[in-house]
Amino acid sequence: MIRTRKPIVVMKFGGTSVGDVSRIKHVAEIVRDYQSENPETGILVVVSAMAGETNKLVSLAKGCVDNPDPRELDVLLASGEQVTIALLAMRLLDLGIPAKSLLAQQARIATSSEHTNALIEGVDALRLREVMRDGTIPVVAGFQGVDERGDITTLGRGGSDITAVAIAAALEASACFIYTDVPGVFSTDPRMVPRARLLDRISHEEMLEMASLGAKVLHTRSVYFAMRYQIPLVVLSTFAGPLRPGVNGTWIVPEEELMEKPVVTGITHRLDEARITINGMSPDIQKISKLFGVLADQGVFIDMISQEKGDGASVNVSITVPDENSLLALETVRGMVPELAGAGATIDRDIAKVSVVGIGMRYHTGVAARLFHALSRERIDVRMINTSEIKISVLVQRKYCEAAVRAIHEEFAEFEIKTVEEIQASA
Amino acid sequence: MIRTRKPIVVMKFGGTSVGDVSRIKHVAEIVRDYQSENPETGILVVVSAMAGETNKLVSLAKGCVDNPDPRELDVLLASGEQVTIALLAMRLLDLGIPAKSLLAQQARIATSSEHTNALIEGVDALRLREVMRDGTIPVVAGFQGVDERGDITTLGRGGSDITAVAIAAALEASACFIYTDVPGVFSTDPRMVPRARLLDRISHEEMLEMASLGAKVLHTRSVYFAMRYQIPLVVLSTFAGPLRPGVNGTWIVPEEELMEKPVVTGITHRLDEARITINGMSPDIQKISKLFGVLADQGVFIDMISQEKGDGASVNVSITVPDENSLLALETVRGMVPELAGAGATIDRDIAKVSVVGIGMRYHTGVAARLFHALSRERIDVRMINTSEIKISVLVQRKYCEAAVRAIHEEFAEFEIKTVEEIQASA
């Protein structure tokens, strides 16, 4: 006898979605409505702490000690989600919907022991399915886990999303809904470009690039997890009515599920990097490798790297690093200038990184040309460039960031309808 | 080879003692000072939620639903102690004192499944000793437990004290210090009688009577637990300096450890009872028994009972019940008047219960006479009387409560020095 498992969805509600009692009631209604419209679907809910609560707990800790012990900080922070799971579960029960709150140790969300930044190692799907067997909705605390010693851990930034995606993967859920305070993923920052369009569907890979390039709606770790386990994610607003294409919700799906493969999906920007250039450096690959090794040992994350010919046989090497580490990185680089046989090092913090992302770039090559064309129309110089299979990033002077985003968005304005096939056909 | 276990003390800090960051720092200093003065003693700390926090959580729940699900309410409430154990543990660690927070499930405080009012069934002493082996101070969440399903439970009123006493019993601790916001147990309410004296030592049994008779410093459940397991309790103020006889701290010890056995230890009062009288009732014991049975089924707790001769063969039966249930009780009693062959039922809510407690009453019989003498001097009528082996309670009109307490305290003013032996010698 073959038993068909009923489909499962995971619904995750972020901090602003459960920010006060009236919002928790609203979330309960969303869950109830979904259940009554999809009676054959099993539902599991993941919630964050109430907005502001985690900051409040951190400032309590900072009031007690300058450097909170990480194990104890995790015990403290984990209390935030404990409040919201209980409140939401009691509200669901009050609406007549069977529900049960589960802390990380009850849901058996096993993690590594790196406190405040633990990695999920496993989720006990059997235990969750057991709770769900009679139709009960588990309301699981996001952001937290338990290590092999039984100590409470937390997952760091984007942690509740990661919990939701990990559970969705373990339960082989048909979708993971990420309810937040924006209606989804836009073609670019709508505060900067009013014509920014809410994307209906994008691939995991595009979302991964966009998240790491500055679209703040999802953290890269959760997108990576969803991509790895092929879980469709839906980002939507708790406050903008039901899921409706173009109005509320962006589906983030495996590439093969995309009906269209637009050349450009989105334009993102970041203002939090700085560029360091070592001039007149020996082209010796071992020296360059040593430089990167020392920076890595200091925990400095290197984003873009470029090398251009300098005077004589020398090369000029530029890197971008997070601005918060840039002065430390500059000091390190300057200290290594003799060893690198360089002439000196300079820093440029007046930069913005603007990127175009689109899975269609895999099949189409004209994007860089159109990008440079758009920027040159606005007389915006490009200081550095970096490409991957599905994205192109350029560094521009910070004051031109907005103009660059607008110009590029304008250039690719038709991406909302054109597909690779259409572009190729019209070429 | 015989290994001598090193002595252990349990230190419990209530909600006002950990009410804010500066108080948590102060508590850490108390623990540090105790440790440096008693380097050979193992210490375990139990803490409550920050004062006001539990009420805040309850009002969040009430904002969500009228009748919170008890299981979920416990999950919610248990988050309060989670905050304080983490803050105190990180503060201790910051002072260089090895410490580790433990939630109820980590300390394995096993309880029954009666949510919001669970009973402790066991404490895993081995686990706690393991944590303490290298000198680490466990900082355990009070008030909460875990049932056999792994669900979080809470212990109800006085819960953190019960946690502390249960752990002290499991670890065979030499003492359990209950740090609170008053310096200990007074001979009577010091707000009512300025000459009230801080008691240095009293027996568990006396404390049990005093707690149930209105002294609010400890809940009867924790005193009962301490009595049952013969754990010396010390009630003292977090804010009144070190333990010092007559200034800060009352020892509550097994009777056999009392050097003196004063005839009267303390005077207590309660204003929260009402008296119901059924007049002209049949003296049939089965009818009276039926009355008590019906009230018990309604959850009405009967405190005092008296019976006096009425008209003819009838009797008048008086009982006292908690005032909050008194109108329900009256209605029930009135409904049963025909069945009880009574003439009618009356209620008197204008009463106060004043009690004298002293373990020396076991050996001395003049207390009742002196009590009545003191009241008659003040022309205070006694409406009802009730005695046990170590206490006498009288009902007086409510407006005379304070006068009665003062008069009785005055009458027994010498109890602070006199012992049974001395009184017998001087008789």
Image (cartoon, coloured by chain):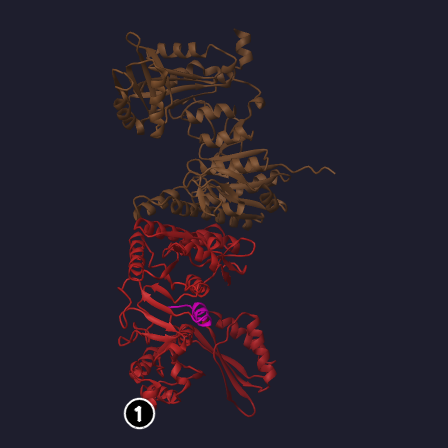
Chain colours: A brown, B red
Residue B75 position in % (x across, y down): 48, 52
Residue B199 position in % (x across, y down): 32, 75
Badge 1 density bin: few <14, some 14–19, many ≥20, Cα 10 Å = few
Q: Which residues are magenta?
A: B217-230
- The image quarter containing residue A4 is top right
Residue plotted at (50% across, 12% down): A364
Q: Foreground: A187 or A207?
A: A207
Residue plotted at (54% across, 69% down): B299
- The image quarter containing residue A215 is top left
Say what amino acid the circle numbered 1 marks.
Ser
What subunit carries mark 1?
B
The stretch drawn in magenta includes residue B279? no
Residue B171, relative to residue A178: is it above or below?
Answer: below
Q: Foreground: A370 or A414?
A: A370
The residue that disc 1 covers is: B426
Give the residue furthest to the front: B1
